[in-house]
Amino acid sequence: MLLAEKITLTAEEYLKGEETADFKHEYQNGEVWVMAGDSGSYR
């Protein structure tokens, strides 16, 4: 079984990624999580 590599992002990197993201995410202490129940239509 392969595990995904864990990476941390700066707040600036997170915000840049959110500009083009298909789904809304939550940023907390360098970790990014997909928001539960997201419809993907927040742009």
Image (cartoon, grey):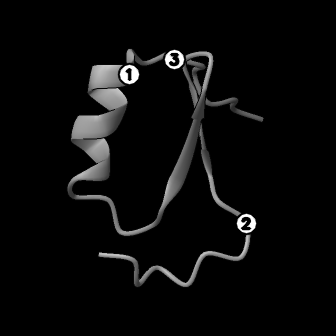
Residue behind mark 2:
36
Residue behind mark 1:
11
Q: Is residue 29 above or below residue 14?
A: above
Q: CA distance from mark 2 to mark 1?
A: 20 Å
Q: How far across and how far down the image is residue 7, in percent?
A: 51, 17
Query: Left of 1 or right of it: where is 40?
Result: left
Few, some or many C-alpha atoms within 10 Å of disc 2 (few <14, some 14-19, many ≥20)?
few
Q: How far across and how far down the image is residue 37, in percent?
A: 71, 76
Q: In the drawing, what numbered circle is on residue 7?
A: 3
Q: Quadrant of residue 29?
A: top right
Q: How far across and how far down the image is residue 42, in percent?
A: 39, 77
SS at mark 3 in the image: loop
N-terminal-most mark, 2 or 1: 1
Few, some or many C-alpha atoms within 10 Å of disc 1 (few <14, some 14-19, many ≥20)?
some
N-terminal-most mark, 2 or 3: 3
Few, some or many C-alpha atoms within 10 Å of disc 3 (few <14, some 14-19, many ≥20)?
few
